[in-house]
Amino acid sequence: MTTDRSNETWLADLQAIGAQQDAAIQDLLSWLERRLFYYLRDRSDLRRLNGDEIAQMAADFAQDSVLIILKKSDQFQGRSKFTTWAAKIAVHQALGELRRARWRDVSLDELTADGSFEPDFLNTEQATPEQKALQSDIIATVMDVMQNELSERQRQALYARLVLGVPSGLLAEQMNTNPNALYKLIHDARKRLKARLVDRGLSPEDALSVFS
């Protein structure tokens, strides 16, 4: 395996045909597997996995990443080493897969069953008791509007995407829709949420000022 190619050589080899391209792809794949292995091994949420499991995960992510890199090779602008650019794509791909895996086996009903949350900033020691009380009141108002003023699908989409952070692609699958339709659903939900908050005398600016 060799990864000491120049940027120009990487691009030429990956865009070639036959054995030259095969060798470059194999070198890139092996290099990405190593980089991803060390990256995944150091993640606290994956420490339950042993070395073999991490290696297999790295190999799977590297395979997917190489396909993406080949498709995007014409976007490489040479501002860094080609391998550095490729590694960023691979890590981004791995993060996306890890996020999707987090929610893959959880149903939408389970995700939105509670309908309550407490953002991390409510636990800050810097806020005074009065500020915490006001923050809690605003959160309660927002959740009440979501529960009573939005449609069930609007509430589910807004809560799952913006509160829980469910990846949009996976959420679209769970809601049996497509990404464009999901975007419009969330857009309409946010617009309605904002209007109903204003009706209750709470503007988005007022809400944000409490947490500044």
Image: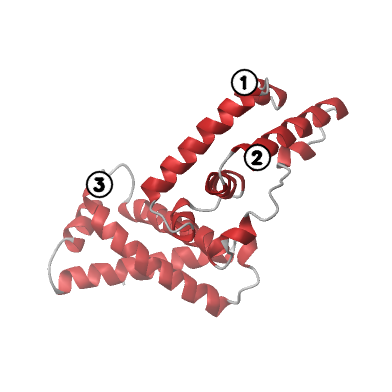
Closer to us: mark 2 or mark 3? 2
Above or below residue 120? Residue 167 is: below
For the residue pair 83 and 47, the one nearer the viewer reads as: 47
The answer to whether the residues at label 2 and label 3 have Cβ atoms under 8 Å apart is no
- Which element is circle 3 on? helix
Above or below residue 182? Residue 130 is: above
Above or below residue 45? Residue 201 is: above
From the viewer's perspective, tell me whether residue 75 is left or right of residue 80.
left
Closer to us: mark 2 or mark 1? 2
| Kind of residue at badge 3 | Gln
Give the mark nearest the N terminus, 3 or 1: 3
Cα separation between marks 3 and 1: 39 Å
From the viewer's perspective, tell me whether residue 154 is left or right of residue 33.
right
Where is residue 153? Give x, y as percent.
53, 49
State the residue position of label 2: 148
Q: Residues within 10 Å of mark 1 (few under 14, many from 20)?
A: few
| Kind of residue at badge 1 | Glu
Cα separation between marks 2 and 1: 22 Å
State the residue position of label 3: 75
Q: As drawn, which residue projects farthest toward the left?
A: 17
Is residue 135 among the parts visible in the rendering?
yes
- The circle on residue 205 is 1
Q: Residues within 10 Å of mark 2 (few under 14, many from 20)?
A: few
The answer to whether the residues at label 3 and label 1 have Cβ atoms under 8 Å apart is no
User: For the N terminus, which image quadrant?
Assistant: bottom left
From the viewer's perspective, tell me whether residue 164 is left or right of residue 15.
right
Where is residue 57? Give x, y as percent.
48, 72
User: For the C terminus, which image quadrant?
Assistant: top right
From the viewer's perspective, tell me whether residue 103 is left or right of residue 144.
left
For the residue pair 29 and 147, the one nearer the viewer reads as: 147
Give the mark nearest the N terminus, 2 or 1: 2
Give the mark nearest the N terminus, 2 or 3: 3
